[in-house]
Image (cartoon, rainbow, N blue to C red):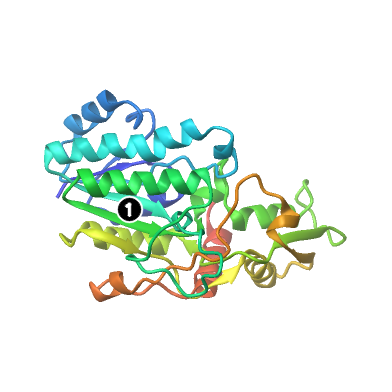
Amino acid sequence: MRIALVGAGGQLASDLLPLLPVDAVPLSHNEIELTDPDSVARALERVDPDVVINTAAYNLVDQAEDEPAVALSVNAIGARHLALACRDRHCTMVHLSSDYVFGLDAERRRPYREDDCPGPVSVYGTSKLAGELFVRSLCPKHVIVRTCGLYGLAGSRGKGGNFVETMLRLSRRVDGSEPAMAQNLQVVDDQCCTPSATLDVARAVAFLASTDQYGLYHVTNSGSCTWFELAREIFRLEKIDVAIAPITSAEFGARAARPAYSVLACDRYERLGGAPLPPWREALASYLEQRRQAPS
């Protein structure tokens, strides 16, 4: 089984590639431009894959509010181009999506299942939902994986970063000396989700890519927390003594709205035989240990 991995170099793809067969082909943005159907066709013609895994996305949630056409061109139209190419080549397409396809139900407090009605509250979420719909309608052999709050080692070194790295950066002085004890960090405490380690999600994606059980799956670490609770656990595990205060989404004032609750139920993936992902606290501790041991 020959696999093409689109979005190579990203957090998830970096952890996923070593789990794939040795002849898997990573495709960076320089090698495939999703917004250009000719580029997509040329890349797949060259690789001739049986399975295409798409981890590429426009992930600038707030910036998408100001440039919706750009977000849609990648997350929706780009997914459409890839779905059509996979259909024409009779490939399986594994497409990564987001918990941000939910959020419209402000009263929701139970995990979303795959058959729950989506309702995004941002341009980014809308673009990801549109991409899902293109893939589902155009590529018969598809697997769509929704996940949430990804963080991985590639993000600790790349310009994009992730929430964990942002918290660690903000808690320390710029020169890398002792934590800035007097600094008072404010973190949103009214958005509940499940932060997920890319290494754990990558294992699940590799498993799903090896099956012929097409459809939509939710894959995250287990449990749930707010961003404030996640930040507090990061500092506890790293033994960083820094003042941190909970605030509301309204007080934070982000450009794009976020779901107040976007926890995903992963039963369908587990019923298929996928190994349950560990609780988010355990995953976070493992990530921080990996981070400490990783070469700088």
**Residue 196, position as x, y percentages in the image:** 48, 63
Residue 134, above or below 246: above
- Depth check, front residue: 25 or 84: 84
| Residue 23 in view (yes/no) | no
Residue 190, above or below 70: below
Q: Is residue 290 left or right of residue 214?
A: right
- Depth check, front residue: 198 or 60: 60
Q: Quadrant of residue 241?
A: bottom right
Residue identifier under label 1: 18
Furthest-right residue in this view: 182
**Residue 247, position as x, y percentages in the image:** 74, 63
Q: Secondary structure at mark 1?
A: helix
Q: What residue lies at 39% left-to-right and 32% top-to-bottom? A: 29
Count of marks, rendered view: 1
**Residue 110, position as x, y percentages in the image:** 47, 75
Q: Amino acid at mark 1?
A: Pro
Q: Is residue 177 left or right of residue 102?
A: right
Q: What residue lies at 48% left-to-right and 55% top-to-bottom? A: 100
Label 1 crowding class (10 Å Cα cut-off): few <14, some 14-19, many 20+? few
- Depth check, front residue: 151 or 92: 92
Q: Is residue 283 left or right of residue 167?
A: left
Q: Quadrant of residue 215?
A: bottom left
Q: What residue lies at 37% left-to-right and 44% top-to-bottom? A: 130
**Residue 163, position as x, y percentages in the image:** 60, 55
Q: Is residue 286 left or right of residue 92?
A: right
